[in-house]
Image (spheres, grey):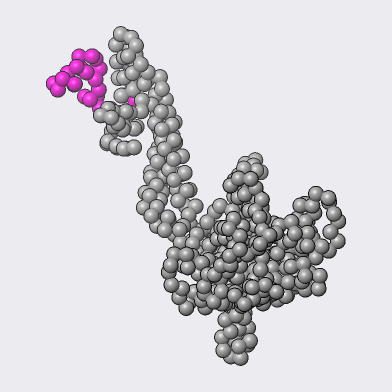
Amino acid sequence: MDNAIIKKDILLNLSVEDGGFDFSTSIADAMAKAETELVVLNETVDSIKGLKPDCDKLDYILATSSGALCGIIDIFLVGKPGEPLGNITDKWFVARTIDFAKLCDPEKKNFDSLDSALRFLEKKFKVPYDQTGLGDAGKIIFDLTAKNHHFKSLAHNPSLLGLFFSILDQFSNTSHFVTDGQLVSLQQADEKWELRGGNIPSKLFCGFANWIGHLISDVSGSSSSAAKGNRGTGLPSPLWTWTNDIIAIKAKLGLSVTETDKAMNELALNIFEKGYDIRFQTAQAIPVFLNELLVRLIYAIRRLFRYFSEIPKTERSFALMWKKCEPFSNATVKRMLTVAHGTFCLVDVGDAVGRSLIAGGDTFNAVEFVLRLNVVGVGRFAISLYGETRRAISYNHAKKEFDFASKETVIVSNYIEGLKILAHQYDDHHLLMFISDFEKSDAYIEAFGKSVTLAEVRNVPVNRILKSKPDIDKYFGGK
């Protein structure tokens, strides 16, 4: 929109499109166009402004306090396998395993204990790759034990690669293991094994069902460990099975396995044997989730109080309240989450380093450090940092557009205020009907009269007023 101000003449609005000219014929028309443009400009400003957080000091203090509180909960209630919250998640997985056994039992038996449910599931979802190192070739060939076979057996890994090897082993009656940095396989793993299904799709479905069912039968340990009242070894954490995946993929591609790959795999195996499984990983997620919940709740409550104190009662609505208080999709609450999860990680890492030095006798004990480190919290903090980086880049790219739109908003707002003043001073709707008169009738005298009156009202100099058709013809003819 181009605005031109001449000393004694007013051009309301003029634009050039497709080689033609478009201009407003009245104050009301110009105001309508300006208000439409103002709405677009405001939407642009709001969308770009939404990329920048609007946190005050109290927001930062509360977010930091939440992170510190949840970090303390992690230190004293989660710690490493075998501490209070870990026992709670163990019991939860036991209850879910029994529920799954009841769901899969057509006779609807009443499983009164974990070992009875596990015996049923182990029999129902039998697989050829379940060597444990107890009385089989696994101990000699793969160095398998009851504590490590769930980690070393690739098909027992709850990952996409684990699913791939489970289907492969069920179709070919084999077992694949990662041991000492190598991928090894056992052929004809079970002489009695036969995958159900009359064709490939049905066999794939049965293989997938067996994989899921067998994983659930192992998540709370084996039936023998449950019968003895032991915790048993569950399934490896999905956040650590990548150490197996790297070795398996490199072996299949013919690439050499580095010493770093072997060291990381050995570290993951060591913490698994000490109880760091999917049950403990779930316990680690509890304080991280609590931190997330607290921060979002704090943000929503603070904005709710601000909404009721600032918005007049007549203007309140649920839609407006949700827009002001929703704690999910705005940059402010995301910045608070970054601060909270960063504080949580700072407390957690400090504790893990201190305890690893104590356990190692003033030397760094890597196993103790990893057992104490809340990997879920670190992962959540990494996601927050990634989001902060993206928003900062997007804001920097849009900053010029934001500055321009902000200035245009001021200009258009002032322009509208000026139109309101003109509208109050001039009631020219009737006078401007001369354009319609020119188009639809030959009442030139009346039309010229209106145009002359309008020019006089708008203080056009007498020598510049065109009072008749000959005057207009001379003007446009260049005379």
Observer-nearest residue: 329 or 479?
Answer: 329
Image position of 134 (left or right of 406): right
Residue under the point 65% across and 43% down: 318
x%, y% of residue 344? 60, 71
Q: State whether residue 231 is above or below residue 397.
A: below
x%, y% of residue 262? 51, 76
Residue under the point 29% across and 32% down: 16
Residue under the point 57% across and 81% down: 366
Q: Which residue lies furthest to the left in this view?
A: 479
Observer-nearest residue: 179 or 465?
Answer: 179
Quadrant of the frame with the C terminus: top left
Q: Does the magenta stretch include residue 424?
A: no
Q: Which residue lies furthest to the bottom in this view?
A: 361
Q: Which segment is the magenta one?
A: 457-479
**Quarter of image, res 258:** bottom left
Image position of 461 (left or right of 264): left
**Quarter of image, res 117:** bottom right
Q: State whether residue 317 is above or below residue 181.
A: above
